[in-house]
Amino acid sequence: MNGFHLLLAFVAGVAIPARAAACEISIAAPGSVQFEGESGQGYDSFTALQFETDFIVILENRGAEPCDGLASFRVPGALIRLLDTGGASLTYEILGPTNTNSVITPAGDPIDRTEAVLLQLASGQSQQLAFRFRVPAQQIVPAGTYSQSAVIEFVETDDAGLPVERSLEFIARVRSSMTLMLFDNSVTRGAGDGRSAVLDFDVLETGEQLSLSLLVVSNDPYTVDFLSEHAGRLAHSVLGDAHVIPYQLTLDGAPIPLGPAPAGTARREPTPAGGNQSRIAVRIGEVGLARAGTYEDVITVSIQPD
């Protein structure tokens, strides 16, 4: 049976909407952000102050479409640390406009969307963001200049398009910080501010000994120097160097050879945050038939970088 056959072919399709062009974001940021401190002296390892400085980044949408994205900072390595040429390091933070969370991430780690700064920019709109470069207090490191290169990057919220980046460098200058204090409640007289102390032997006797504590705080290697006004002898307060009584000065049991020139200790390493405490002792030598009167010497104690 002949028939007429009609073959109908149906082709169905789904229209795919064209995606808007990727965001066209430009970033304006300083080439470097450096902490100098209000005094210009830089980071001090031994204070509990916050060390921070503010800087501005401007992002502009130059595209024809609105753009939503996240702004954050990234470092090339695995550690977020400022380094000096000797290998010492400082930890630091970059705080966002809310000043609550750090917005810097090591290379290879995904962006923490809860910490990055969310931006919604209309076409032609720019937004200024205030960030804070903070170096936490009481990190004991040698004096020097510490830095790390980083980038600020903008990533679209739907991860479309390539990140937009701008390079910058974070820098902190650490100053040399050295202090010393003399103290011992049982033998110290005077102001009690740690800058001076008096060892009062009352009536001198051969072999008598008194001591006090020396506290040194330093973020650099150092030596302790001692300079005696009477070259390591107690001199009569009226008759002077014509009538003297010898004594021996020790630091932690090691004799200090006092003379007309400063006598120093061997190199000592940087101290912890609480400092290093040493014991200064004075032992009276042979008193013999010394003239009656008051005998005294003044010792100046100082610390020097080594």
Image (spheres, rainbow, N blue to C red):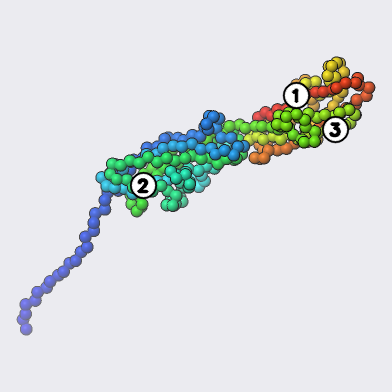
Query: Which residue lies at the image location 90% right of the left edge and 29% below the top edge?
Result: 205
Q: CA distance from mark 2 to mark 1?
A: 64 Å
Comes first in the chain, label 2 or label 3: 2
Q: Is residue 73 visible?
A: no
Mark drawn on residue 119: 2
Q: Is residue 29 visible?
A: yes
Comes first in the chain, label 2 or label 1: 2
| Residue, disc 1 | 227
Query: Which residue lies at the image location 52% right of the left edge and 31% below the top edge?
Result: 38
x and y percentages locating residue 97 in the rendered image: 43, 43
Depth check, mark 3 against mark 1: the one in front is 3
Tell me if 289 is positioned left or right of 254 in this view: right
The correct choice, above or below, for 242 with respect to 269 in the image is: above
Q: Which of the 4 quarters of the picture holds residue 43? A: top right
Q: Quadrant of the N terminus?
A: bottom left
Q: Secondary structure at mark 1?
A: strand
Q: Secondary structure at mark 2?
A: strand
Depth check, mark 2 against mark 1: the one in front is 2
x and y percentages locating residue 234 in the rendered image: 84, 23
Comes first in the chain, label 3 or label 1: 3
- For the view shown, which residue lies furthest in the right direction? 289
Query: Which residue lies at the image location 34% right of the left edge and 53% below the top edge?
Result: 158
x and y percentages locating residue 203 in the rendered image: 89, 28
What's the amino acid at mark 2? Leu
Q: CA distance from mark 2 to mark 3?
A: 72 Å
Q: Secondary structure at mark 3?
A: strand
- For the view shown, which residue lies furthest in the front direction? 191
Mark drawn on residue 209: 3
Answer whether labels 2 and 1 touch (C-beta < 8 Å).
no
Q: Nearer the viewer, residue 133 or 238?
A: 238
Tell me if 49 is positioned left or right of 3 in this view: right
